[in-house]
Image: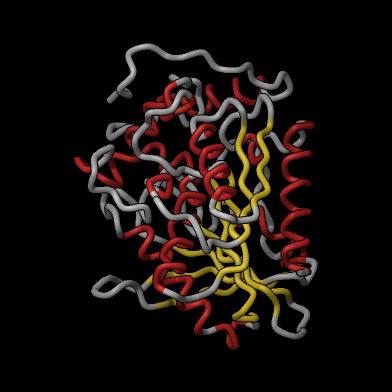
Amino acid sequence: MTANCPETPARPPFDPELVPVLETLRAEAGETATVSAQTLEAARRRNAEGFSDIEPVDLTAGGAVRIEEFQAPGPAGAPEITLLVLRPVAESAPRPAIFHTHGGGMVMGNRMAGVDAFLPHVADGSAVVVSVEYRLAPEHPDPAPVEDCYAGLVWTAKNAATLGVDPERIMIGGSSAGGGLAAGTALLARDRGFPRLTHQILICPMLDDRLETHSSQMLDEEGVWDRNSNLFGWTALLGERRGGPDVTPYAAPARAEDLTGLPRTYIDTGSVETFRDETLTYARRLSEAGVSVDLHMWGGGFHGFDQVAGQAAVSRASVATREEFVRRALAG
């Protein structure tokens, strides 16, 4: 399966400090560097195992964080969903919650994936994090993933007292497909009138199924999420509807005609990133709709660079900027 552009457009250079990491990723990914129907199972195993130079994360943060799991009702007629809950061990008044939607191109990942991005805010006692295990495509196409996320969000708000959460202070966040699902879930929460979200944290979000932008076509077998993997992920989610007129904004938030009434937004991307242009456009349109937006584009960054190359200067700057935004949001 290949993307619908015959030639690969020009791309900016990768940050020099990221190049050795990218080369390692390419070598370790092997056949799973491009995700397809043929490589999906291997890619899922590779995604679950992680890469050799990334240390496993202690989600207890040395004993400061309590790990729990809850079963919540799924969408009507669907199975229950599992929610991972990270709470500070120290008791205190109800805290803000960060509802987390994991990445994985709509086809990979689980509730543990990427949740460590918000772990520091639990460890310091500022927040409770709830991470949802949504059903994956292609076995469970749209609207299963976003409806699972919304069901988990509703359960979190309705069970705030049990979780030690302030129901008036819930934000949503995720990266990649999780960023797209966070944006889609925020649209659902707005349109269904519950719950009210204070912020959305959209990290290199997957927003647009149409694959018409320059950046959506500029990466071809680079060892990161390229145009071929992106086409597969969206097609797994949407099937024959991908790119056509019958895709809802909850599945592909870039299609939303009305972005008013959405929560304050943090949104970021790398400059060498498949999702770059849709991210920049979404940020602009949110601003035009009257939403307060903090937008950051990191020069030379590829998809997920801050997660896989944490010691690089651009990664440290990216993480520090995002964490500072979340700290201010939690304190507000």
The percent coordinates of residue 306 (x first, y second) are 67, 38
In the displayed structure, would residue 12 be above or below residue 115? above
In front: 265, or 223?
265
In the displayed structure, would residue 154 be above or below residue 246? below
Is the C terminus in the top left, top right, bottom left or bottom right quadrant? bottom right
- Side of 311 where 289 appears, left or right: left
In front: 36, or 76?
76
User: Which residue sits at x=50%, y=59%?
Assistant: 260
User: Which residue sits at x=73%, y=36%?
Assistant: 315
In front: 89, or 172?
172
In the displayed structure, would residue 268 be above or below residue 114? above
User: Which residue sits at x=68%, y=27%?
Assistant: 299
Furthest residue to the left?
Answer: 240
Q: How is the image coloured?
A: secondary structure
* Tally of numbered tags: 0
Is the N terminus in the top left, top right, bottom left or bottom right quadrant? top left
The percent coordinates of residue 202 (x first, y second) are 57, 50
User: Which residue sits at x=37%, y=78%?
Assistant: 73
The percent coordinates of residue 56 (x first, y second) are 65, 49
- Side of 5 where 289 appears, left or right: right
The percent coordinates of residue 131 (x first, y second) are 53, 64
- Side of 296 where 197 appears, left or right: left
